Image (spheres, rainbow, N blue to C red):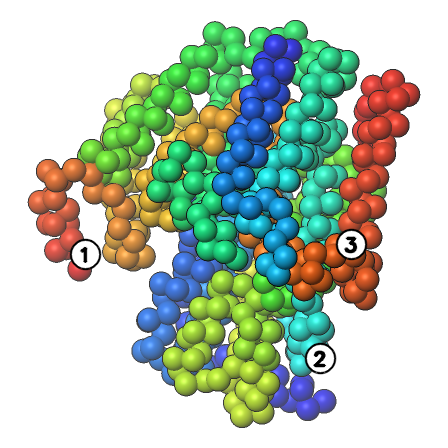
C-alpha cells in the first residue's frame, strides 16, 4: 500500500493551484496543437519546452505532460471533422471517425473518442502505477527480432483492413514501405531512391506528406466529384442531452474497442521504438478482427473510433515508462521530455524512483489529473468543432485545402514536400476511383522506418538466418500468428479463384 | 472504368520496375558481416508490388474486381471539370506560394474558391479570406515561431513591418 500513499501525495502535488492552472493551459494548448494537421505532440512539447524553465521542474514536467495529453485528444478532432489525421497516432481514427461525421454523427464520434481516450488514459495510469518497474524489464527483452515480428503482425492486420481486393491491398502496403525507404539508408548512410536526383528526396518522404495528400487532397476531390457538389456534411445539433445519449451509445458500441485499445496500446507503447502509432493501428486491426460484424468497421462504427483513441492515449502514458525507469524514450515526444529532464538536472533511470520520489509520483499523479481535465476540456470544445462541420461544403473544402497545404509545409518546412503532397493527392484521387485501398499505404509509411532497421539488425544478429524470427521465445509466436493472418485471406482468395465464384465478403 | 483499371495496373507495374531498378543503385543482396544491402528492402518490396500488378491484371482479365466490370467512364464531364477547377486551383495556390508568400497565396485561393466556385457573397468571401491568413500568421509566426514562406523579395518590407508588431 506504499504505492497508494505515494500516489496520493503525487495527486495532491498536481492539485496545487499553480499546477492545476498549468494543466488546464497545457491540455487546451495541446488540444489545438494536436488538432492542427502537421503539428503533433512533438511540436507542442518541443516549442513550449523553453517556457517551462520559468517554473520549478516538478511543475514544468506536469505542464509538458498536460500538453502531451491534450495533443493525444486533439489528434482525433481533425481526423473526425476534417478527415485529415491530425498526427500519425490518429491515422486509424479517420477510418471510422470520418464516415460517422459524414453520416451526421460527428458528435457521437467526438464523444466516443473523448471517452475512449479518457478510459485508455486511466487504464494505462493504473497499469503504470502498479507495474512500472516490472514492465520495464519485459520491454527490455524486446530486441530487433521481436519488434520486427510485431511490425509483421501489424501489417498482417492491415491485409484484413483493406477490404476485398487482396492484391491491391498488398500493393498499397508495399508502396508505403518503399516510400518510407526514400532518403538515406540508415545503416550504410548512402543516399537511396533519390528520384531524378531531386535534393528534396534526401530527407525522405514524411508520412504526413502522404497522409495529407491522400486524405486532405485526394479524398476531398473524390468527395466533391462523387457527390456532384451536392454535399451536406452534417445536420448534427448539439445539446447536453445529445451528448449524454451519444456517450451512452458510444460506450455501448465501443466498449470492446476501448478495452482492446487500452491494454494493447499500453503494451505496445512501452516498447522502445514502437510507441503510440503502431499501438493505435494494431488496436484498430484487432478490434475489427474480434468484432461480431467486422464489415461495419470502416463504414462508421464507434468501436473503430474507440480502439485507436483509447490506444494512443494509453500508449502515450506507456511510452513514459521506459523513459522514467530506464532512460530510454519510447517515442519522439518522450525523447524531448527526457531532454527537458536532463536540463532540469534530473537523471532518468532506475535510481530516479529512489532519489526523486516526489518528482516521479508528482508526475504520475499529474497523469491522472491531466487526463481528467483533458476529457473535460475536450467535451467542452465539442460544440465548437461540430459548428465547424455545419459550414457549407464550399466553405469547408477550401479551409481543408488551406490547412492541408500549410500542414504539409509545417511538417518539414520544405516546399518540395508541398508539391509532392499535391502529386500524391492527384494519384490518390485516381487510385481511390479504382478501389485501391490507400489507408494501408499511409500506415506502411509510418511503420516502415521501424520495420526495415529491425529486420536488418535481426538478420545481422543471426548472420542472415531468417529462422531467428521463429526460434526466439517472444518473436516466434508473434511471427507465426502474423503469417497465419496473412495466409488466411490469401488462401481464401485462391480458393475463391479456383471455385470460380465471385467474392463477397461478410 | 475497365480501360482505366488495366492502364493503372500497367502504370503501377512500370512504377514497380522503375523502383526495382532504382533500388539496385545500392546492394540488393546479402553482404556477409553487414546484413542485407541497403537496396534489398525496397528491391524485394517493389518485386512484390510487381507480382500484385500481375494479379490485378489477371483479375481484370477474368472480370473479378468491381472496376473491371464497371461500364462507367472514369471521369465524365463533371468529373473533368471538378478536377480542372479544384485541382487547378490548388496547383495555382501552391505555385503562388513562392511568389506572393504563403499568406498571400492563401488569400487569393480563398477568394477564388469561395467567390468563384462556391458563389458566396463578397462579404463572406472578404471576411474569411482576410481573417484566415491573419489567424494563421498569428498562430505560426507569433505563437509557434514557425516561419512560412514569404515569397519573393518585394513582400519583404510588408513582413518586416508585421514582425515588428509580433516580436
Between the C-alphas of marks 1 and 3, the distance is 55 Å
Q: Chain of mark 3?
A: A
Residue A482 appears left or right of A230: right
The residue depicted at 85 percent of the width and 32 percent of the height is A492
Label 2 and label 3 in one chain: yes
Label 2: which secondary element: helix
Q: What's the chain of the residue with tag 1? A: B
Numbered mark located on residue A479 in the image: 3
Q: Which mark is residue A134?
A: 2
Q: Which quadrant is home to the N terminus of chain A?
A: bottom right
Between the residue at mark 1 and the residue at mark 2, the CA separation in whole angstroms equals: 49 Å
Badge 2: chain ID: A
* Left or right of A23 on screen, residue A357: right
Q: Is residue A67 above or below residue B139?
A: below
To which quarter of the image does residue A28 belong?
bottom left
| In the image, residue A74 above or below residue A489 | below
- Point out residue A444 in the picture as x, y percentages from the top left corner: 60, 44
- The residue sitting at 50% across, 26% down in the picture is A427
Crowdedness of circle 1 by 10 Å Cα count: few (<14), some, many (20+)?
few
Label 3 neighbour load within 10 Å: few <14, some 14-19, many 20+: many
At x 56% / y 12%, what residue is drawn? B74
Query: Circle 1 sits in a helix, a strand or a loop, which is it?
Result: helix
Q: Residue drawn 36% across and 38% down? A: A198
Which residue has dot 1 on it? B166
Looking at the picture, tell me which residue is in the foreground, A479 or A195: A195
Q: Residue furthest right?
A: A499
| Residue A204 shows in the view | yes
From mark 2 to mark 3, how far is it between C-alphas?
25 Å
How busy is the neighbourhood of tag 2: few (under 14 within 10 Å), some, or many (20 plus)?
A: few
Q: Position of residue A293 (x, y in %)?
A: 81, 38
| Percent position of residue A11, x then y | 56, 81
Amino acid at each position: 500500500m506504499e504505492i497508494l500513499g505515494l500516489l496520493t501525495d503525487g495527486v495532491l502535488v498536481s492539485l496545487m493551484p499553480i499546477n492545476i492552472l498549468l494543466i488546464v493551459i497545457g491540455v487546451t494548448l495541446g488540444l489545438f496543437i494536436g488538432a492542427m494537421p502537421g503539428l503533433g505532440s512533438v511540436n507542442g512539447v518541443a516549442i513550449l519546452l523553453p517556457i517551462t524553465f520559468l517554473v520549478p521542474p516538478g511543475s514544468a514536467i506536469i505542464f509538458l505532460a498536460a500538453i502531451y495529453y491534450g495533443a493525444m485528444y486533439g489528434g482525433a478532432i481533425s481526423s473526425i471533422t476534417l478527415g485529415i489525421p491530425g498526427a500519425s497516432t490518429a491515422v486509424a481514427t479517420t477510418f471510422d471517425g470520418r464516415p460517422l461525421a459524414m453520416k451526421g454523427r460527428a458528435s457521437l464520434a467526438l464523444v466516443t473518442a473523448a471517452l475512449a481516450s479518457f478510459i485508455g488514459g486511466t487504464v494505462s495510469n493504473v497499469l503504470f502505477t502498479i507495474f512500472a518497474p516490472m514492465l520495464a524489464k519485459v520491454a527490455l527483452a524486446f530486441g530487433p527480432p521481436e519488434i520486427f515480428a510485431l511490425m509483421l503482425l501489424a501489417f498482417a492486420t492491415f491485409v484484413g483492413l483493406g477490404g476485398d481486393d487482396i492484391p491491391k491491398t498488398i500493393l498499397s502496403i508495399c508502396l508505403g514501405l518503399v516510400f518510407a525507404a526514400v532518403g538515406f539508408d540508415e545503416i550504410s548512410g548512402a543516399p537511396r531512391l533519390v528520384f531524378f536526383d531531386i535534393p528534396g528526396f534526401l530527407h525522405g518522404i514524411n508520412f504526413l506528406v502522404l497522409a495529407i495528400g491522400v486524405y486532405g487532397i485526394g479524398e476531398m476531390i473524390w468527395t466533391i466529384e462523387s457527390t456532384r457538389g451536392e454535399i451536406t456534411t452534417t445536420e448534427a445539433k448539439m445539446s447536453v442531452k445529445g451528448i449524454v445519449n451519444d456517450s451512452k451509445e458510444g460506450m455501448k458500441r465501443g466498449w470492446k474497442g476501448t478495452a482492446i485499445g487500452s491494454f494493447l496500446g499500453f503494451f505496445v507503447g512501452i516498447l522502445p521504438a514502437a510507441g503510440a502509432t503502431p499501438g493505435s493501428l494494431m488496436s484498430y486491426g484487432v478490434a475489427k478482427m474480434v468484432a461480431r460484424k467486422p464489415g461495419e468497421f470502416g463504414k462508421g462504427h464507434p468501436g473503430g473510433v474507440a480502439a485507436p483513441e483509447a490506444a494512443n492515449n494509453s500508449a502515450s502514458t506507456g511510452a513514459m515508462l521506459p523513459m522514467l525507469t530506464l532512460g530510454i524514450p519510447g517515442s519522439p515526444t518522450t525523447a524531448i521530455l527526457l531532454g527537458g529532464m536532463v536540463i532540469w538536472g534530473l537523471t532518468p533511470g532506475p535510481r530516479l524512483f529512489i532519489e526523486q520520489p516526489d518528482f516521479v509520483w508528482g508526475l504520475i499523479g499529474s497523469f491522472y489529473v491531466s487526463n481528467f481535465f483533458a476529457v473535460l476540456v475536450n467535451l467542452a470544445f465539442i460544440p465548437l468543432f461540430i459548428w465547424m462541420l455545419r459550414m457549407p461544403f464550399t466553405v469547408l473544402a477550401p479551409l481543408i485545402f488551406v490547412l492541408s497545404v500549410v500542414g504539409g509545409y509545417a511538417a518539414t518546412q520544405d516546399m518540395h514536400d508541398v508539391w509532392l503532397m499535391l502529386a500524391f493527392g492527384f494519384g490518390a484521387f485516381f487510385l481511390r476511383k479504382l478501389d485501391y485501398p490507400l489507408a494501408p499505404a499511409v500506415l506502411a509509411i509510418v511503420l516502415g522506418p521501424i520495420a526495415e532497421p529491425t529486420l536488418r539488425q535481426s538478420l545481422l544478429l543471426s548472420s542472415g538466418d531468417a529462422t531467428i524470427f521463429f526460434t526466439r521465445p517472444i518473436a516466434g509466436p508473434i511471427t507465426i500468428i502474423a503469417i497465419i493472418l496473412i495466409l488466411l485471406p490469401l488462401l481464401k482468395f485462391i480458393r475463391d479463384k479456383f471455385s470460380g465464384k465471385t467474392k463477397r465478403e461478410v | 472504368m475497365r480501360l482505366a483499371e488495366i492502364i493503372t495496373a500497367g502504370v503501377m507495374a512500370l512504377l514497380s520496375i522503375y523502383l526495382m531498378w532504382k533500388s539496385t543503385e545500392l546492394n540488393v543482396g546479402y553482404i556477409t558481416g553487414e546484413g542485407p544491402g541497403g537496396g534489398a528492402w525496397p528491391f524485394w518490396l517493389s518485386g512484390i508490388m510487381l507480382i500484385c500488378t500481375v494479379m490485378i491484371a489477371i483479375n481484370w482479365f477474368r472480370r473479378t474486381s468491381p472496376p473491371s466490370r464497371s461500364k462507367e467512364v472514369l471521369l465524365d464531364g463533371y468529373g473533368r471539370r471538378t478536377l480542372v477547377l479544384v485541382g487547378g486551383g490548388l496547383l495555382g495556390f501552391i505555385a503562388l506560394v513562392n511568389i506572393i508568400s504563403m499568406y498571400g497565396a492563401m488569400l487569393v485561393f480563398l477568394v477564388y474558391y469561395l467567390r468563384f466556385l462556391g458563389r458566396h457573397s463578397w462579404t463572406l468571401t472578404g471576411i474569411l479570406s482576410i481573417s484566415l491568413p491573419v489567424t494563421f500568421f498569428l498562430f505560426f509566426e507569433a505563437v509557434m515561431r514557425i516561419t512560412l514562406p514569404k515569397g519573393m523579395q518585394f513582400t519583404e518590407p510588408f513582413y518586416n513591418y508585421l514582425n515588428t508588431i509580433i516580436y
